[in-house]
Structure formats: structure tokens, C-alpha cells
Image (cartoon, coloured by chain):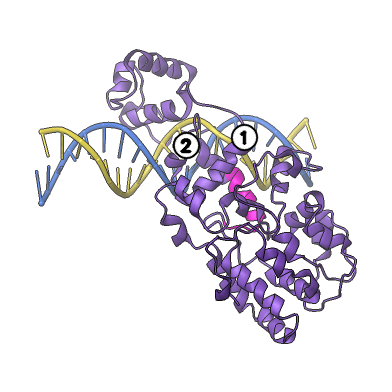
Chain colours: A purple, B yellow, C blue
Amino acid sequence: MGRAPCCDKNGLKKGPWTPEEDNKLISYIQLHGPGNWRALPKNAGLQRCGKSCRLRWTNYLRPDIKRGRFSFEEEETIIQLHSIMGNKWSSIAARLPGRTDNEIKNYWNTHIRKRLLRNGIDPVTHSPRLDLLDLSSILGSALCNPSLLNLSSLLGNHAILNPELLRLATILSSLKQENTEMFLQNLQDNQLLSSLVQNQFPLSQVSQFQNPVEEATSAPFLSPTQLMQTDLGGLSCLNSLENSVPSSLSDCLVSQPNSVSCNTNPPIPDKLVENSGLQPITNGCQNYSIESVLSTPLSSPAPLNSSSTFVNSSSPEDERESYCSSLFKFEIPESLNMDDFL
DNA sequence: AAACGCCGCAACCGCCGAGGT
DNA sequence: AACCTCGGCGGTTGCGGCGTT
């Protein structure tokens, strides 16, 4: 573990710390307290540079450090704070008692970041990744069965909705009577979708908040937790849909009685279906009910450790994976003026 | 059993800002 | 204003453990 000594400047030792060195450092700090790191190694009888001592203390030896696996709550907090602060690990660590910035950084890079990527979420922007996003299939499916679009229930929902998505839903709804073909063409061109995705979680909205509490309570769009729940990557989405969304998308996906074939909807590759554990749908069209998708109340994100979220999970990692169970969750600002979208 | 490759994480590196002179 | 010192931070490295072949 740790980096091997690359040099030995000034006779100072580098590399992994020995228990003896740890004991010396702990004993000295217990007597004199931390600080004055330049002079500390000499006074403590350590052949280390002050910086190395400080890092060893702050990242490993400090008595208040909590070691062990990150809890769901901690992980949720990290994701939320990262979406606000970016790679400000020390700021994030300040809000996670017992965790160091280094530990959080490592955990982010080795666990959370990978999972976000798997789920089709850009870990930097916390936005769905365009290269994996296949909203066109979702919307195309909706177009195949416009009855699935129920705006009235949407408008009666107290959740908060991303205006761009609401606009999209409105357009789709209007297409019940109008020119479906034209819209399908637009979908194929993907211009609308690109615009949608790029505008969905602009970073500028993140930076305008003075603190995470303010941001968490006033942000009009998806919270980071919801973003984790927003799974657009396909594979894990399908898996989680089958396992844990009994009332919404998975129902539409598997058991929708009036499924309609749709040529514009690219079928799920067999391999994906196979890996996801999802039963192949022979007509090649999944029907997503926007009504059901939009029905989740969202004044506060569901806790990560909500037991109802985890079904058929075999490991904590799987549990967190299945946490991305809802394809979309929306929030509708009370001030939203529907006229803007109609 | 051995070889190989991947992953996790402690530790290092370089940069930056604050504070003192 | 310029310089220096110190501490803090984020990014990166690479060893050791573990799983896979």
C-alpha cells in the first residue's frame, strides 16, 4: 500500500508509516497538540517531513476518524454535496463527521464515480450522459401509445417538474391529435433531445447557491439524489425497473396490455436484455407511462436506505445500483406558469 | 498453483492562498 | 509591494490484496 519512496531528500523517510512512527506521532500530538508541522517531526523524533506527518495525522491517526464502509446516508450526502461543490473534498468532508477529504475522494473515484457512469450520469456535471442517453426510445414509445400521456394528472401533481420536460410532455400530448410524423422526425434528428438534456441540469444553477441547504431547498430541478435515481444508461435501468418499480415503468414495460408496435423505437439489444435479466419484449416497443413516471412526490428525496427500494438485491453494491429505480422524478415549481408551455 | 490483471487506498506531489515580516 | 513560510487542497501514483484465468 502507498507509494514507495521515490527519493530520500535530506535524509527524510518516505513511504508507508511504521507502527513505531505512528506511535511517536500520536504521543507527540497528544502532548503538544497538532500544528507547527515543520518543527513537529524533529521534536517528535521522526525522520519525516512535516507535511507527511500532517497528512498521516489528518488522514489516518486522528482519533475521531470513522473508518469502514460508507453508509447510504453518507453516500447520498457525498453525491448531493459533490453536485453542488464539485471536487471540494475538504468542504464535503467538513459535512461528514469522521470522514477525511482523502477518504471521500478515494471513495468517490473508486465507487460513486463508476456507478454514476454505469448509470449513464456524468459524474462531473451530474447530468445524464448524451452518449448513453436514449430518450428518443422513451419518447418514441410514448408516441406509440399517446394514451399513456396524461397531462391532467401531471398538472395535478404537487411534485416539481423540470420545465423542459414538461414542455416535452405538452408537445407529446398535443401530438395526440396532430402531426405525429413530424415530431418523430424531430426525435430522429435528436435536436430536441439534445436541447433538453443540455438544459436539464445547467451548472450555473448550481453555483448560484450560497450554501447546500439553500440549494437543496430551492433548486427547481432534480436533486443529486434524484439524479442517482435517474437512470438513463439502459442496462442497470432495466434491471432496476424490473426489480423495484412495480407501479410505474416496469409495469408499462412488461405488462402493459395495450402495447403498440413502434418502428421508430430501437429495440433493446439482446445482450442488454440478457444481462439485465429482463424478459425480451417481442414487439420491440416499450411503453412508458409519463403519468406514472411523473407521479412520484418529491419534496424530499427518498432515503437511500429505504428498504422498499431494494428488492432482490444480493449485495450492498447491488442495492445501491437498484437505487436508481425510477427513470424520472420531477418537481413542479409552484410558480410554474403552464401558459409558457402551451 | 502460478500468472495475470484489476482495484482500493494510503501517501506523495505540486500548486495555491493566507498570514507574517 | 514584495517576499517568505506554512498549511491546505486536489490530483496522481503505485503497492499490495484479491479475483480471475
Residue type at tag 2: Arg
Q: Relative to A223, is A179 above or below?
A: below
Residue that appears at 50% across and 46% down: A81
Q: Is residue A203 left or right of residue A191?
A: left
From the top left corner, tell me how far across and down residue A271 is, in percent.
82, 61
Q: Nearer the viewer, residue A89 or A102?
A: A89
Residue A340 vertical position relative to residue C13 in the rendered view, above or below = below
The C terminus of chain A appears in which quarter of the rendering? bottom right
The local crowd at label 1, few if under 14, some if 14 to 19, many if 20 or more residues have their Cα within 10 Å, is few
In the picture, measured across the screen, residue A197 lies left or right of residue A317, that is left
Residue A95 is marked as 2
Q: Mark 2 vs mark 1: which is more N-terminal?
A: 1
The chain under label 1 reads: A
Q: Is residue A191 visible?
A: yes
Displayed quadrant of residue C9: top left
Which chain does the numbered disc 2 sit on? A
Quick one: SS at disc 2?
loop
Q: Nearer the viewer, residue A98 or A37?
A: A98
Q: Position of residue A209 (x, y in %)?
A: 42, 53
- Tell me which amino acid carries mark 1: Ser
The numbered dot on residue A71 is 1
Q: How far from the left and from the top, in percent, is residue A41? A: 33, 22
Q: Image point 47% across, 41% down: which residue?
A: A92
Numbered range of the magenta stretch:
A110-122
Residue at 52% x, 55% y is: A124
Mark 1 secondary-structure assignment: loop
Which disc, if any, is residue A1? none
Where A85 falls versus A290 (above or below)?
A: above
Relative to the observer, which residue lies in front, A234 or A337?
A337
